[in-house]
Image (tube, rainbow, N blue to C red):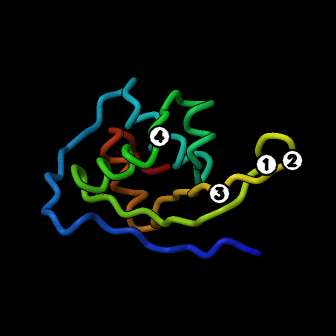
Amino acid sequence: MEAQAIEVNHSGQTPRRRKHIRRGTKFSAVLQALLERGSLNCFQAALEHHDFVLRSTIATLRREYGLTFHKAEESVPGHNGSSVRCTRYSLTAEDRAMVLELLDRRAA
């Protein structure tokens, strides 16, 4: 069964719309990964970027920066052949330029 994308918006609070995200933070690592890979799940975030709470990182990025993410449920291989349900996050097309600005990069 193919995952169905669900758009996730911020929680109704007015985002603070900060101007930039410092390099070397987990927020910059996650956003850079989303730009380069296109999407990320919690296992990839933990293994590759040492972010063990991707769900909270995404929530903070929505709340603090006003970003919007697509969310898709998926199954990945687990222990002894079992499967594990997790969420795959990706940026919306509209927010990619905003992320480049937050990371202090110019669009290529």
Label 1 residue SS? strand
Residue 81: mark in rendering = 2
Please tell me which of labels 1 and 4 falls first in the chain.
4
**Residue receiving disc 1:** 77
Disc 2 marks a residue whose amino acid type is Gly
Give coordinates of residue 33: x percent, y percent: 54, 41
**How far across and down, in percent of the image, does residue 87 sit?**
56, 57
Q: CA distance from mark 2 to mark 3?
A: 13 Å
Amino acid type at image mark 3: Arg
Q: In the rendered picture of this protein, how many numbered marks are placed on residues?
A: 4
Measured in 3D between alpha carbons, the distance from the residue under mark 3 to the one under mark 1, in whole angstroms, is 9 Å
Q: CA distance from mark 1 to mark 4?
A: 22 Å
Q: Secondary structure at mark 2?
A: helix
> What's the distance in space between the residues labelled 2 and 1, CA to CA?
6 Å
Q: Nearer the viewer, mark 4 or mark 2?
A: 2
Q: Earlier in the sequence, mark 3 or mark 1?
A: 1
Going by the image, does 56 lie left or right of 82?
left
The residue at the far top in this view is 24
Q: Which residue sits at x=33%, y=68%?
A: 9
Tag 3 and tag 4, C-beta contact below 8 Å: no
Mark pair 3, 4: CA separation: 20 Å
Residue 90 in the image, given as x and y percentages of width and height: 52, 58
